[in-house]
């Protein structure tokens, strides 16, 4: 609980870069709401709680339509003839998700004359050109916190998968092989290793909290040092200088947003400064890494293992080098869209839509851009 | 620390079933010591700390030979013409490991006229016919505690792999696919789920301790209820009646030794009483489960995921049904043989050999059979 309130205290404050502002609050009458989610096809009917897909539509169709609103849901989001493009000119609200993002470019924002609100079902709005959205006076919001536990748990899983060299063992099993040495020569305990998180926002803090009983040496780099009491509770040491922290780490976890400052941050030069044999977990955003530099360092062995669920672009093309580099434990973008997370972010989107219809404020921490004003960390 | 001392307090006491006893302490002169480990081949030279394989020989060859002892090391352990059989008649000590066990049958014990000491490099002695070993007056000992952290970490990894449905995501990646729905329709958070451990000895306690920050509902069944202070620290609820606990669990972790009482315990009837969709992690011993009953329940979906590193027999044959059942996340027997664990159990074996040569006692908790007397939990 101390952790949550401290995290809230550290939330971004709002600054201003907007030149004009559209009305956020819905004018009376029917609204056109477009949702872009991933399609489930044969999986849709297998779980009644599976609301995060096109077919599940966040479970808000009846609620929206009973109030006279129009609700278009699709996964068809690319190219000039896609379903999304057909609705851009007259939609009021666009809901999408990091797991199958509708990329909201400056060009699309210019076409979207009625658009007022961009909602992320989940966390993160880097699929939106935030500068253009702010200049157009839009509001951009996410369901802050909706899947932080989901992502933190997944990060810890990936740390263990890499440290303990799980993948070669699993592949032996399904191929009919048995070769303990081929796994154990590079399998380690997590205990006593140095784990550093680059970014210690809500997800980073939840990860550190879960790492504590593993008796590691925990480090964190962030813009903000934690309160001493929280730091002690979490058991992690603050590293003000990122470049000083990175070479100390056996395991590095990326927990910062993608911004213009962080895009491509882990390039060949930065990776070259990491400990040889470092393990990297990245559930933040794929574009924080230089794709080819990561693949090359995995091939050379400088990076001994890389795991994450984020890629650029998404969906990852069939020839994305991370699919085929050695010692990877990658998945599609999944960590924040467990069934539990889907139920939470669907509820959060519904709450914000309800506020929008009623002319009420959203929870303060949800705003990325508020009526044209960009939150400080995105400036 | 409280945990460790409580665990020690709960250690097995020794009982007696032996009819006669061979001298444990080494008579003066050269001893013949045989080690049976897994072979590393091309992996042997890739890590200088890789001591757990035939080639590494626990790193004790120079130390043994400098004292005039003979040290034979092999992985060839099956059939009448194997390397192990050649040395059975005159060896004094046999060292082996659960990861590639030399099965010590009554027949082999009868042949081994000079045998005094059976050491497990690791934990567990179910590869030994303990009744026959006790009747022959042998001493059987393990390196208690040498890999409990390794196994507990691995169990937590497997819980997360199953709950979060990691495997289908990884397989999509390497096949060039991208289908988030095919993963997320049955991916969950660990938070708020009910996890029960069957057995809360040292490994079970370390697992519970690591699970605590995940905010689960933790249950444990054991012969012994923990001290109230330890129970509170760990945050788990005691379940005296195993059959009452099992149907409550979303996730069941097996943490008990293989004995005549536990062999085949999870048969069709027992599995039928578990919650539909249960996840099972078993790093204890494969033979605790009825192999075909587990495979059938995975196929029907009654078990929604099964992960572990133990099989019967080991190495698992190419046609073992667990290799091919749905929703498995199996590996060869690996969790207790990380590099860190190898260094600990190699040091523990060396210490016991040193005691044996000097006529000193082993650490009390290491004994399975002490000069013909079987430890109570094996009776």
Image (cartoon, coloured by chain):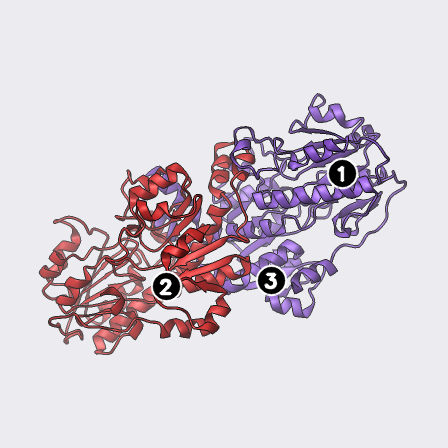
Chain colours: A red, B purple
The picture places residue B359, in percent across and down from the top left corner, at: 84, 43
Which residue is label 3 attached to? B219
Image mark for residue A222: 2
Query: Which subunit holds the residue at mark 2?
Result: A
SS class, disc 3? strand
Image mark for residue A131: none
Q: Is residue B124 left or right of residue A124?
A: right
Q: Are marks 1 and 2 on the same chain?
A: no
Judge whether residue A232 can be spotted in this image.
yes
Category of crowding for the residue at label 3, using alpha-carbon neighbours closer than 10 angstroms: few (below 14), some (14–19), many (at least 20): many
Q: Is A236 in front, or is B264?
A: A236
SS class, disc 2? loop
Vertical comparison of B130 with A209: above or below? above
Mark 3 vs mark 1, CA separation in Å: 35 Å
Instruction: Please report the residue visible at 24 percent of the width from the left and 73 percent of the height from the top.
Output: A14
The picture places residue A163, in percent across and down from the top left corner, at: 49, 47
Mark 1 vs mark 2, CA separation in Å: 53 Å
Query: Which subunit holds the residue at mark 1?
Result: B
SS class, disc 1? strand
Which residue is label 1 attached to? B118
Category of crowding for the residue at label 1, using alpha-carbon neighbours closer than 10 angstroms: few (below 14), some (14–19), many (at least 20): many
């Amino acid at each position: 609980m101390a952790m949550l309130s401290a995290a809230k205290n550290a939330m971004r404050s709002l600054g201003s870069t907007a030149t004009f502002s559209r009305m956020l609050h819905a004018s009376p009458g029917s609204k056109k709401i477009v949702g872009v989610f991933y399609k489930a096809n044969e999986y849709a009917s297998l779980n009644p709680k599976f609301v995060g897909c096109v077919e599940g539509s966040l479970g808000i169709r009846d609620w929206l339509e009973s109030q006279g609103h129009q609700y278009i849901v699709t996964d068809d989001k690319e190219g000039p003839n896609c379903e999304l493009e057909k609705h851009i000119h007259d939609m009021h609200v666009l809901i999408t998700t990091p797991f199958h993002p509708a990329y909201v470019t400056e060009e699309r924002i210019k076409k979207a004359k009625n658009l007022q609100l961009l909602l992320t079902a989940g966390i993160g709005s880097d699929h939106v050109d935030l500068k253009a959205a702010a200049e157009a006076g839009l509001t951009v919001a996410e369901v802050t916190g909706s899947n932080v536990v989901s992502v933190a748990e997944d990060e810890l899983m990936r740390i263990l998968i890499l440290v303990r060299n799980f993948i070669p063992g699993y592949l032996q099993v399904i191929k009919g092989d048995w070769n303990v040495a081929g796994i154990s020569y590079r399998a380690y305990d997590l205990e006593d290793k140095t784990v550093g998180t680059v970014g210690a926002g809500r997800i980073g803090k939840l990860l550190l909290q879960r790492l504590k009983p593993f008796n590691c040496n925990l480090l964190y780099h962030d813009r903000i040092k934690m309160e001493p009491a929280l730091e002690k509770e979490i058991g992690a040491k603050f590293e003000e200088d990122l470049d000083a922290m990175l070479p100390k780490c056996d395991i590095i976890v990326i927990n910062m947003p993608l911004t213009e400052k962080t895009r491509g941050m882990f390039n060949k030069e930065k990776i070259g400064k990491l400990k040889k044999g470092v393990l990297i977990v990245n559930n933040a955003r794929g574009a924080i890494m230089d794709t080819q530099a990561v693949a090359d360092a995995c091939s050379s062995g400088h990076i001994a293992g890389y795991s994450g669920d984020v890629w650029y672009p998404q969906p990852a093309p069939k020839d994305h080098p991370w699919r085929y580099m050695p010692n990877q434990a990658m998945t599609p973008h999944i960590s924040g869209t467990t069934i539990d997370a889907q139920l939470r972010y669907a509820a959060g989107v519904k709450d914000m839509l309800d506020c929008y219809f009623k002319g009420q404020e959203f929870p303060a921490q949800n705003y990325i851009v508020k009526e044209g004003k960009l939150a400080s960390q995105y400036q």
